[in-house]
Image: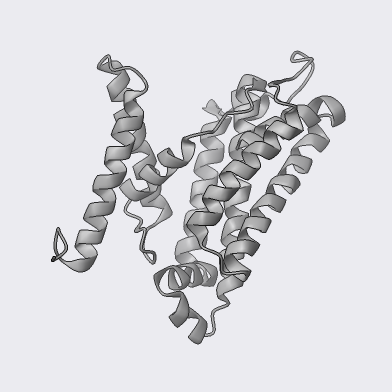
Amino acid sequence: MSFSTIVVLDLHDKLGAGLAIPSMYLMTLGLGGFIGFLVGYLRLNSLIVTLGMLSAIHGLTLLYSGGKNMDIADKSNTWFDFFGQGQVLGIPVPILLFVLLAAFLGILLAKTPFGRKVYAVGGNSTAAVFSGIPRARTVFTCYLISAFCVATAGLIQASRSMGSQNTVGQGMELEVLAAVILGGASLLGGSGTVFKTVIGVLMLGFIQNGLLLMGYPFYVQFVITWIIIILAVWLDISVKRGKFWASI
């Protein structure tokens, strides 16, 4: 997200919004495809690759920006702010994009052959391969879809503020993980829906806003988010094995 936001802001002044947006999407999809290749085709551990790429892409963002923050030079003569500040029929564009993406991906996951392949690979990749499902291609495609969503988030973030620090989005991976787990997706794979994940996102937002309204400092959110992740993972594993703790 940091990379997408910085790139689209920088290219906006160099190429204009019409070319900056598709260029940013292509570059972000390239990074997502590279990660998908490492995990899907080279069979590297997804967690290790994710942690490594977090640092690598952050470094790439700093190299690209020269360690500087980005701002659009002429903010009064552009339509770029539409994605973050515009409205369609009274509905803010970011909310509209969120709803459209959630609806499309929810249908894709629940009602299409590709969605069934995702569940199969997530539940048991070995069994999926023996069933004739292309595991590597399915994983690769999932990372491309993830990269597209991240690029959209970066576009919205850049459009809302018309400028950005090169660290925007850092730490958000924990919020995403907490929201997905709250939505009922299992870290063991094979279960979860987009609709329930949306509910998890809303629940996490309510919790964070509630903490602020109660007068707690913003950094308390990090502690609460981590506690939510631990409890949710514990409950998920407990349900899978049928007991709350492992035998000694």
Look at 26% across and 57% down and name the residue there. Answer: 236
Q: Is residue 89 above or below residue 57?
A: above
Q: Is residue 54 above or below residue 62?
A: below
- Note whether residue 86 is visible: no
Q: Position of residue 16 (x, y in %)?
A: 83, 29
Look at 36% across and 23% down and name the residue there. Answer: 219
Q: Position of residue 226 (x, y in %)?
A: 32, 38
Q: Quadrant of residue 200?
A: top left
Look at 29% across and 33% down and name the residue there. Answer: 224
How is the protein colored in the picture?
A: one colour
74 horizontally vs 124: left or right: right
Q: Is residue 195 above or below residue 243?
A: above
Image quadrant in which the N terminus is located: top right
Q: Residue furthest right?
A: 15
Look at 31% across and 44% down and name the residue there. Answer: 229
239 horizontally vs 110: left or right: left
Q: Position of residue 87 (x, y in %)?
A: 59, 26
Q: Nearer the viewer, residue 65 or 240?
A: 65
Q: Quadrant of residue 22?
A: top right
Q: Nearer the viewer, residue 92 or 119?
A: 119
Q: Position of residue 15 (x, y in %)?
A: 86, 31
Q: Is residue 210 above or below residue 96?
A: above
Q: Residue furthest front?
A: 248
Image quadrant in which the C terminus is located: bottom left
